[in-house]
Structure formats: C-alpha cells, structure tokens
Image (tube, rainbow, N blue to C red):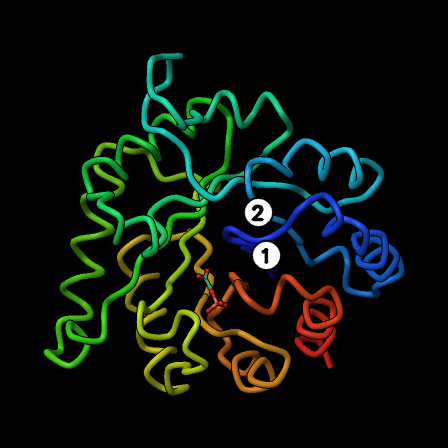
Amino acid sequence: MYFIANWKMFGGLNSLNSLHKVMKFFKTFKKKRIVKVIYCPPNTLIRPMTKKLKNSKIEVGAQNCHEKLEYGAFTGSVNSKMLKSVGAKYVIIGHSEVRKAGENNRLINLKIKNSLSSGLKVIFCIGETLKEKRKKLTKKVLNQQIASGLKKIKKSKNILIAYEPVWAIGTGIIPKKKELFETITFIKKKIKNLKVLYGGSVNSDNINQLKLIENIDGFLIGGASQDHKKFIDIIKKTYN
Ligand code: PGA
C-alpha cells in the first residue's frame, strides 16, 4: 500500500521539524515492509527533506515538472532531471489543480515520458469533474485521460495511477464504496498490472470506510498529510 503526502503549496523549513516523529513511527511499524510512504513537498523543501529522511525508508517526490528534458529559458520552471538531481524519486503529473491552470493531456503525456526517462517514478492523476460525473461521463473521461496521458508510453511499475475525482478534492466528500470499487476496477481493466491509488479528502475518519475497498493500492493525501498525527493515524488505521 502506498501513502503519498501531497503538501501542495504549503510548508516552510519549520514544517520539517515533525518528520522525525513520522520516521520514528515508521521504524517500528509492524507493516512497514508492505507500506510505502512518499512525501511530495513543494520544490523548495525537496532537498532538505531528502536529507532529513536519509536514514529512513520514506521517499520524496515532487508535485509537478516542466515538460522539457533540457535546460532552457523557462522562467519559474523546473524539469524532471533537476528534481531527480536534488533527491526526488517520484513526481505527481496531471493533478487536477495543475490541469485547471491549463495543463492539457498532450503536455501530461510529454511530462510523463520525460520524467520516466529522467529516472523518476510517476504518480499519474486522473479524475472527472462534478459536471462530468452528473452527465455520467466518468468512464469516458478516464478513458481519454489514460489513453492520451500514456500514449506511446510503455507501461511499467514506474507508473502509479491516482484516481482523484475532482469533486472529492478538498471538499470532505468521498465517493460511495460501490462506486469507487467499480471505478477502480474499470481503471485496472484499462491498464493492467499498475497500482491504482485513491485521492480526494482522505482523512483519519473516512479511512475506516476507504480501507474496506479491496482493490485500492494506496492513497494520495492532501490536507490531512500536512499534520503528522493525522497522517500517521491514516496509516495506522488502514491496518487496524
Ligand atoms: P485532499 O487533496 O486530500 O486535500 O482532498 C488530495 C489531492 O489533491 O491530492
């Protein structure tokens, strides 16, 4: 099971002070062999976080990258090679908050391709909006996002899929159990042998419901991951 913390645009150096508590928890956690914990902080914290986590099994990733592999005159951007060089092992691509700011499927495809060639593992986010869900377009949208996002990309275990319904992100609302099971099943049929995680308002209360859905391979956690107690609680409760 994967537990991925997406810190979004939150956190300064002092946010790293509680990491030792998560490390301490994880060191003695009985299920640590079957659990993978990954932190995706803002780029400014990747290097210091990697250093802090040096002696632990917890890994670090980024939340986005520029699509180009080379250096270039792209003010404010960072590419996958640069992320890799400061210690990132993963990168989130296709997050709905980035899509909303103008990232399209073609760009996502390029970012995934180049991130993989830089040696990063990709957490590829897909998910429908509320409008699309109401129009019963969920499967169609997911199909399209998968087909174009992974176009001409060899499927490998270096790609993880995160199903994040846009309407569930940051809203406190999660999909119904049956609905989520069916959607994850649908995704797994489309792309065989890849891990599929769920993301969207995962917290230390609803994890008791979410953990019952057998085909979920882990969680992408936003808001609740910034509080180490809540994050630890989510991991613990998954196995209680
Ligand atoms: P949330 O965010 O847990 O705050 O809903 C999840 C995400 O955007 O990855």
Category of crowding for the residue at label 2, using alpha-carbon neighbours closer than 10 angstroms: few (below 14), some (14–19), many (at least 20): many
Q: How many marks?
A: 2
| Residue beneath the point at 50% across and 37% down | 121
Q: Is residue 130 above or below residue 157?
A: below
C-alpha separation, residue under disc 1 versus residue under disc 2: 6 Å
Q: Give me the residue at 77% from left, 58% from top.
A: 32
The residue at the point 68 percent across, 31 percent down is 47
Residue 214 appears at what percent x and percent y? 51, 76
Q: Which mark is residue 28?
A: none
The C terminus - image quarter? bottom right
Residue 40: give its label: 2
Which quarter shows the N terminus?
bottom right
Q: Nearer the viewer, residue 93 or 183?
A: 93
Residue type at numbered disc 1:
Ala
Question: What amino acid type should be assigned to the residue bearing mark 2?
Answer: Cys
Left or right: where does residue 66 sit relative to residue 197?
left
| Mark 1 and mark 2 residues within 8 Å of each other at the beta carbon | yes
Secondary structure at badge 1 equals: strand
Q: Is residue 230 above or below residue 157?
A: below
Residue on which the image places disc 1: 5
Q: Quadrant of residue 71?
A: top left
